[in-house]
Image: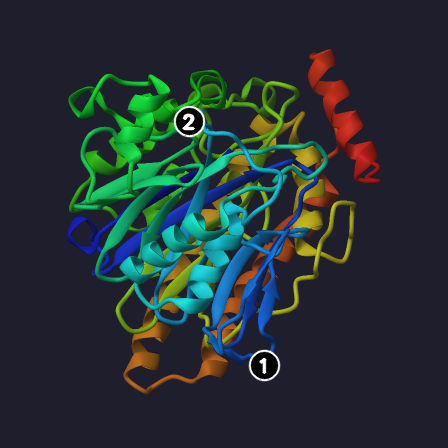
Amino acid sequence: MCDTLVALRNSTKENCSIFAKNSDREPNEAQLVEIYPRLKHEARTVKCTYIEVPQVKETHTVLICRPFWMWGAEMGVNEHGLVIGNEAVFTKEPYSKTGLTGMDMLRLALERCKSAEEALDLITGLLEKYGQGGNCGFTKEMYYHNSFIIADPKEAWVLETAGKYWVAKKVKNVRSISNALSIKREWDKASPRLIDHAVEKGWCRDDKDFSFAKCYSDLFYTFFAKGRIRQKYTQRKLEEKIGEIDFTYIKKIMRSHYTDLDYTPVRGSMKDICMHAGGTTRPSQTAGSLIVLLYEDLQLSWVTATSTPCISLYKPVFIPAGIPDIGKPKGTYDPQSLWWKHEKLHRKLLSQYRTYAPEIRKEVEKLERKLEKLAKELRDKYVKGEASLKELFEVTNTAFDYAYKIIEKYDKIVEKGFILNPFFNYYWRKVNKQALLNI
């Protein structure tokens, strides 16, 4: 399960729009952060996760965050400032065993488009031509449809789908989406026969009775995903601060838990924005988080490149400057990768979260304030021709060095404790065994 949001420039203090997404996946489903350069292609097709589609002659430079085993990405931004995040949604339309995944469509759009509306038209065209489908679960089969926030420095769109049917609505000020259809009776673009199909299925009487979210939602899976609760929370938090939203406030939302005051992972729930896995009813956790400041000239991306943003450092990344080598984690423990180094610490903290998490968070936020000031100053200088790509890379490299030092420091301090919850303990013993991780 995931959460995605956007605040347009007219709603922020940052002189830019802000996009953010938490990507929730299985706890051993490591997520990669990668930059692919602008490329010219001779091949006629490109192999996505399950199917091939025609390749274009040239693709844009992209920064993407993706589950290690997929071709497509959960979220990303390209050199033109186009940024997209997707959400799993559960609908009454049948799920296909093959087709393009939502992540495939997202990456294809980032590689081929320059603006939000262009990406919207590409994704809907791909959807209607190839359909969406394929197993999106790592160790267990999981099929779903997709919704998206698609944004650029000037505008943003919400796109929601059900099979080959879709609706899209342009964002006015702020908007969030989660694991539930949210567009009801008002939209700006839609697929042909959207209402006719719902009427034929008996989901509504006529166009006056029609609501996309009501007619097309699978109520059972939507209820248990708790997406409506999370979307309502993030939307409210954004609306409360229209005109005052900044990077710090967005980070606070992405790190929030449903019961922040007395939160521990064992008491977590599917209502959390920063999610920690906890068993059959909570099999996902936040595997990575991305926040992008959408300036018109040079975007400033902030990545965790690690799970659980509540105890992770957001690191600044500039697409032209690149990122350091942080390993290529897979589904089992790899001590050479940043993602697994952090995840090992996170799992040791499960039993001592209240003891150490506030201390780590305080240290992380102090470093972020320093990095934010430095990164924004360098961005401004680079745009004016007064700073180099090397200097941009150095601030990114410094941030990742900070992250490694925090992890190493607390990995030595924290000892795994015992939790008085046999189901929680059994779940994590099983997950750790699958990951070949001994704690």
Extreme residue in the front direction? 200
User: Which amino acid is tagged 1?
Assistant: Glu
Q: Where is residue 143 shown, x and y percent of the image?
A: 58, 33
- Determine the secondary structure under disc 2: helix
Q: Mark 2 sits on what residue?
A: 227
CB under 8 Å between discs 2 and 1: no
Q: Where is residue 22 shown, x and y percent of the image?
A: 47, 42
N-terminal of the pair, mark 2 or mark 1, is 1
Instruction: Tally the marks.
Output: 2
Residue found 34% across the figure and 66% down from its top: 81
- Observer-side mark, 2 or 1, equals 1
Tell me if mark 1 has few (under 14), some (14-19) or many (20+) residues whose alpha carbon lies within 10 angstroms of its own: few
Q: Relative to residue 18, is residue 262 drawn left or right? A: right
Q: Relative to residue 5, is residue 52 drawn left or right? A: right
Q: Residue 64: in sight, yes or no?
A: yes
Q: Where is residue 377 shown, x and y percent of the image?
A: 33, 71
Q: Relative to residue 92, is residue 282 drawn left or right? A: right
- The image's colouring method is rainbow
- Determine the secondary structure under disc 1: loop
Q: Where is residue 13 shown, x and y percent of the image?
A: 20, 53
- Residue 42's label in the rendered image is 1
- Which quadrant, please, contains the C terminus? top right
Q: Residue 367: in sight, yes or no?
A: no
Please tell me which residue lies in front, 252 or 373: 252
Residue 415, relative to residue 209: is it above or below?
below
Q: Quadrant of residue 89?
A: top left
